Amino acid sequence: MSLIPNSSLWCFTIYAVFALLTLYFYWKNKKAVFFSTFGMSFFLGLGVVLLIPFLWIWDEQFHALVAKHIAEDPLHPQLMNFAPWLFEGKDWDEQVTWLHKQPFFLYSIALSIKIFGTKVWAVRLPSLLLYALTSVAVYDFGARLKDKRVGLLASWMFIHCFMFLELLSGRMTTDHNDAFFLCLILLSFWTHFRFQESKNRRWVLLTGLFVGLAILTKWLVGLLVFAPWGLQIVLNQNRFRWSEWKSLLTSLGIAVLIALPWQIYTLVAFPETAQRELSYNQEHFWVPLEGHRGNFSFHWLNLLETFRPEILVLTIIVLVVFWKKWKESYVYHLFFSALLLLVFYSLAATKMYAFIAPSIPLFILTIAFVIVSLLEMIPWKIISNVLFALVVFWMVNMTLRPDRIIDDYGLDVTAEMANAKDLYWQQMQFIQKHGDDNPKRLIINANMRQHGNIPWMFFTENKVVRFIPTRVQLERLKREGYSITAIRFGEELPEHVLGDTSIEILDFN
C-alpha cells in the first residue's frame, strides 16, 4: 500500500517526461536543456512538496506563521501578534517580535502567502522555485567548469539530493531557511566563476547580490565565496593588480549595502530583541544551544549520508595527484570552500544536521569534475560513454537515498509514521472544524501536538496559546475584548477555567 497522493504521482510523471527531454536535449547539444532541467527539478520538487499536506513542527510551522504576519505587517516580523504582555520572558518559540532568523526567506514566503493564501504549498513554493533555478545554474556551472557531461552529472546529483528535497518540503529541521541559504551560496560561487571566466563586471554585481541575500537568510557564513576569492588574490601577489581587489571589494560593498540596512533597522526599531538575537547567534559557536551537541566528527559523518566514503576518498586522491595539471581550475576553489565550511561548523559547539547543506553542491560539482576527468582517460569512447551513463544513474541513487525518502515520508506505511500522520491529521481536522476568522477569539491549552497553537494561527484568524493563562491574565484578556475557548485533553483543566461559565470548552480526542 502506498501513501503517495495522486497530485504527487502526476508531478512525478511530468518530472519523468522532463528527465527524458533533458537527456534528449543534452545528447543533441540543445540550449533547451536549461528549460528541461528547470522543469525536471521543479516537478520532482513539487511532487515531494505535495506528499505531506501539513506543516512540520521544526521549524516550518514557525516560519510559516511569521511569514503570514509579515504579509499583514511587513515592518514588524511577529510570531505571536497579540497581547505582548502575555509573552514577556518567553523563548523564541513564543515571542512577539520575531528576529530569530534573518528575513529574506521569510519575506519570500510572505509574498507567496499574500498571492496564494495560507496554503501549505504556498509556504514551500519560494524554496521550490529557487531550487529549480539553482539546478539550471549547476548545469551551466558544471558545463563551463569542464564540459556538458560535468553539467549533466552535477545537476542530476543536485536535483535528486534527498537533503535538498527534504529542506524545501519542510521535512528537515531548519527547512526553507537552509534551502534558501544553500542555493544562494551556490549562486554566489556560480556568478564569481562567470566573472573569472569572462571578466564581465555584471557578474561582480550579481555575486554581491547573492552574497547579500545569503547574509539576509542565515548571517555571515554567506560571505563564504570571498574566502577562495581573496586567497587567490593573495597567492598571486607576483602579478598583483589593484583591479582584482577592486572587484572583490565592489562585490563585498554591494553585499553590505543589501544586508546592513535590515540590521540597522531592527537595532533601532526593536533594540532589545535585536541585541538578544545577535548575542544568541554568537553563542552558537561556543555553546551547544537547545541540546544540539556533537563532537568534531559530527558533520563529517553526516556528510556520508549523501556521499559514499570511497567517492570522497577518490576525489581527494585525484585532486592531489593532478594538482600540477589542474591547479588553475576553479574546482579547487569549490573543494577548498566546502572543506572550510565543514571545519567551521565542526568547530562550532552547536551542531545541526543541515548546517553543512551549503557545502553539498560544492562537493557535487567537485565530484562530477573528478569522475568525468577520469572517464576521459579511457581511450575507447563508446566504453567511456556507457560508463558515464551508468555513473549518472548510480550517483543519482547515491544522493537521492530512496531508502531515506521512503522512511522519512512513511511511504512504506510503517506503523510509526502512519501513527504520526494520524496525529497531524487529527489536529488538522480539529482546527478545520473549530477554527474561524474571529481575531478576538483566544484558544488556550492548544497543545494537541507539540506547539499545536502555531498551525492553528496559521490556518485561522484566531489567537492561540499552548499554555493555560492564570486567572488574572484571563480577566485582563477578557477586558481587552477576547472571548476564551479552552481545549481539554490529557489532564483536566484547572478550576479557574472550568468554573468560568464564559469560557467555551472543546474536547480533543
Image (cartoon, helix red, strand yellow):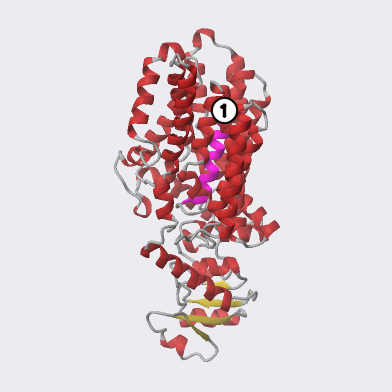
Position of 187 with respect to 289 (left or right) is right
63, above or below 389, in the image: below
- Circle 1 residue: 141
Quadrant containing the N terminus is bottom left
The picture places residue 415, in percent across and down from the top left corner, at 37, 65
Residue 453 coordinates in the image, percent (x, y): 51, 69
Q: Can residue 175 be found in the magenta stretch?
A: yes
When asked about the image quadrant of residue 447, the answer is bottom left
Which is more toward the observer, 263 or 349? 349
User: Dot 1 lies on which element?
Assistant: helix
Amino acid type shown at disc 1? Phe
Residue 86 visible to the viewer: no
In magenta, the rendered stretch is: 174-188
Q: Is residue 135 left or right of residue 427?
A: right
Q: Residue at x 33, y 33 (%)?
A: 309
- Residue 173 image point, x, y percent: 45, 52
Crowd band around label 1 with a 10 angstrom C-alpha radius: few (<14), some (14–19), many (20+): many
Q: Which residue corresponds to the image point at 46% horizontal and 76% vertical from the top-left? A: 445
The overriding secondary structure of the stretch rendered in magenta is helix
Residue extending farthest to the right is: 115
